[in-house]
Image (spheres, coloured by chain):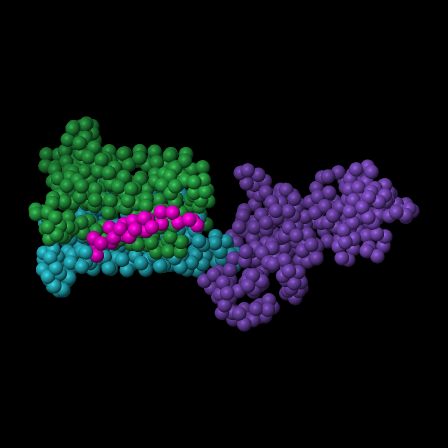
Chain colours: A green, B cyan, C purple
Amino acid sequence: MKRLRAWFLAPTWTVMLSLFAAPLAIILAYSFLTRGTWGGISRPWSIESYQRLADPIYLGILWRSFWIAGAATVLCLLLGFPLALFISRAGNRKNLYLSLVILPFWTSFLVRTYAWMFLLRDTGLINTVLQKLGLIHNPLPLLYNDGAVILGLVYGYLPFMVLPLYATLERLDRNLLEAAADLGAKPWVALTRVVIPLSAPGIRAGAILVFIPCLGAYLTPDLLGGGKTVMIGNLIQNQFTTARDWPFGSAVSLTLMAIVLVLLLVFVRRQEGGLV
Amino acid sequence: MKKKWLAAPLAIYAVLAYLFLHLPLLILAGFSFNASRFTVWQGFSLAWYRAAFQNGQLKESAWNSLIIAVFATIAATIIGTLCAYGFWKRSQPVLAGSLYMSLVTPEIVSGISLLAFYQWIFRFLHIQLGMHTVILAHVSFSIAYVVIVVMARLRTVDAQLEEAALDLGANEWEAFRYVTLPAILPGVVAAALLAFTVSFDDYVITSMVAGVDSETLPMVIYAIARRGVNPVVNAISALIVVGFGSLILISERLRAT
Amino acid sequence: MESVLELDEVSKDYPAHRAVNAVSLGVGRGEFFSLLGPSGCGKTTTLRMVAGFEDPTTGKIRLNGAGIEHLKPYQRNVSTVFQNYALFPHLTVQQNVEFGLRRRAENHIDQRVRQVLELVQLTGKESRFPSQLSGGERQRVALARSLVLEPDVLLLDEPLSALDPNLRKQVRAELKNIQRQTGITFLFVTHDQEEALSLSDRLGVMSGGELQQVGTPEDLYLRPRTRFVASFLGLVNWIDGVGVRPEATRVTKQPPETGARSRPARVVQSTFLGNCVHVEARMDAGPTVVAEVSRLGESFSEGETVDVWWQPDDELTFAGDEPTQE
């Protein structure tokens, strides 16, 4: 039995070691090297790439990535919570409503990002409609800024917030809510004093599931930010293409990975502590 | 809940939320039929679809995407199914952890690390970036999805069935093949459909490891979109959404059987 | 009688505890042998070691004289009927029953399947799926699936416990019938002492991983070697360290028989059970005993002063409480 299992796991081990672990090991090594004259890598070994991260420009990019990802996460939470609440109370239509949330997500991410380009640009639908309605005379600069990026991220990752929230809300004991109502609590109070605190595990799970991909986003800031919104992901991509500074790009990548790992660890600790 | 508090406001909100989620795509698709290239409706037309199908670059890249997706899906589904089966027998925390990490790693980091890895390997093997490098990359990130879907299916299978098979004279491989595999087959197919869409749609990783001759459809769409909005992209997008949507619907149905 | 199955000092250790402790027993060819005991006593673990799903930590298992403890389940000529039947849901009854035969690529599969389905009275249901069958029918498919392989020993893991209680007696009789007809050796595991006593040619009682006693139902009931065996197989009145069965315990307002031991007592309760009456009486010395009396004899009411008596021959005595093995 054990031998068969070993054979079954061997291909995955091979792929993970060669195409996941080894690449990461290589960029770990590269991060301690120096940029070659024509790009790429060369000796000597140094920690210069990591030291460069302390430069205000790069710290600024880091900070901006955090605040954009944070804003997207908070918006996802605000927008997703009522939706999750609605679905959890929908009786036998729950699965249908859930599918309606999940389905757009599994179509193309690229297409969904492009859709917002189509809507937000100067000659896009929103501006055209607003101008036709006479509400504005000149097009609003809706695209190619931080706001558009946040919008694109929220649109892309909202299902990641809705699903864990739904899972937690669905498991809530209905009796608690009825008890609150019996004790005279108005709906708003029951919501803020009972439902929201009890859905903390779901909120945490949704937050981490949204924040981490947003932090490392590349495509959304690239297309919707138009090169003006530089997040960590764009910085990394730039180092490996235009700037050809592989050591620095590697250092930034590993820093991002480290941040992601720390966030995950903190999250796992919190969840296990919170699970009664 | 007997008392439906907040029922009306929540329902209204839900409608708005669903509109937010679905309208952009619907509008995009709608305007793919617009006779004009401006965002003013000027009549129904299939011109952009015709243009899309006549565009050589689009067709070639779509074909590349298809080839890559098919090979990557087959490989990832087989490897991932076997892996899920191995996990079912006894948990493997290290391997499971690494699969989870591969899901959580930002795509740009996966992309550049694979690029670095390939360039390093190419010092020893005299090959270049091309379809094969893309396929391998796709396999590496698809396995995790397959494992998740198949594991979910395996949890519904009674472990004692394999014992019964062994008891009746089947060896370990026959037990898997004649008893467990038929039971999980819908899950395996669902996983394959999922892996296919994930592979076909990938832009970030693919763009880092594709060669000159292995341009994929997302790469072409990206290039066009970067320059601005083009109704041909609307048309392709509509096709992609419908295509992927159908595959995912089938996949969901299979997972529910 | 030759032994077709022998367990020789078989033990099974888990990290936390010893599930089976040095069990030795022999099952004769064509015998209906039961392993009886409460849940957790190790009987199922023992069965699984014979089937090959667990490896014994120490000890030997011999089938027809040859050691099998290192063989895989599919290399042993034994077959198991599982408690939950473990029927393959994606295969029909026919395909389930012929599964083992197909793995062996044997001849005359259709004919043999037909015969065994006749034996378990499932003819006509060949193309049904397990989900379309009743609990009793599924159990018969599980039985047929193993029987058709003509194993040296058929292992049954509490096969009746998943059935409706009213179905059990009937299936029990059918099971005994099938065993007689086919002559296959049955190793039957159960926690129900009535099942074990009525079905078995011989049985072994287990507790805490140890085999306490092996013998015929009569042997074990009338001459139990340990207190555990005595109380597991039926009610026992414990009086001053000695055990007396309710049917041997008499209650009377008249003087007892000669030679009998007696104690004064007060009636607590008299319960009519249909074919007999159980009279509970608290003895002055302390314990409450239950006497089984004929409904045609004296009747007793609460509070009456009576004599409880029994014949010394009916006493169950034990050489200490050490468990013994055969």
Against A28, residue C261 (above or below) is: below
In the image, A4: left or right of C73? left
Against C253, residue A252 (above or below) is: above
Please give the name of the residue rendered at 61% of the width and 48% of the height, measured from the top-left corner. Answer: C43
Q: Taking the image as drawn, is residue B82 in sight?
A: no
Number of on-image labels = 0
Residue A3 vs residue A99, the one in the foreground: A99
In the image, C289: left or right of B93? right
Q: Which residues are magenta?
A: B1-26
Quadrant housing the C terminus of chain A: top left
Name the dominant secondary structure of the magenta segment: helix
In the image, B38: left or right of B196? left
In the image, C96: left or right of A136? right
Is residue A95 in the magenta section? Answer: no
Measured as percent of width and height from the top left, residue B187 is found at 37, 56
Residue at far left of view: A138
Q: Taking the image as drawn, is residue B24 in sight?
A: yes
Residue A33 vs residue C158, the one in the foreground: C158
Residue A145 vs residue B235, the one in the foreground: A145
**Quarter of the image where one finds residue C240:** top right
Please give the name of the residue rendered at 15% of the width and 39% of the height, measured from the top-left corner. Answer: A229
Is residue B18 in the magenta section? Answer: yes
Measured as percent of width and height from the top left, residue B68 is found at 23, 55
Measured as percent of width and height from the top left, residue C28 is found at 67, 56
Measured as percent of width and height from the top left, residue C257 is found at 90, 48
Please give the name of the residue rendered at 35% of the width and 44% of the height, measured from the top-left corner. Answer: A165
Please give the name of the residue rendered at 60% of the width and 45% of the height, measured from the top-left corner. Answer: C40
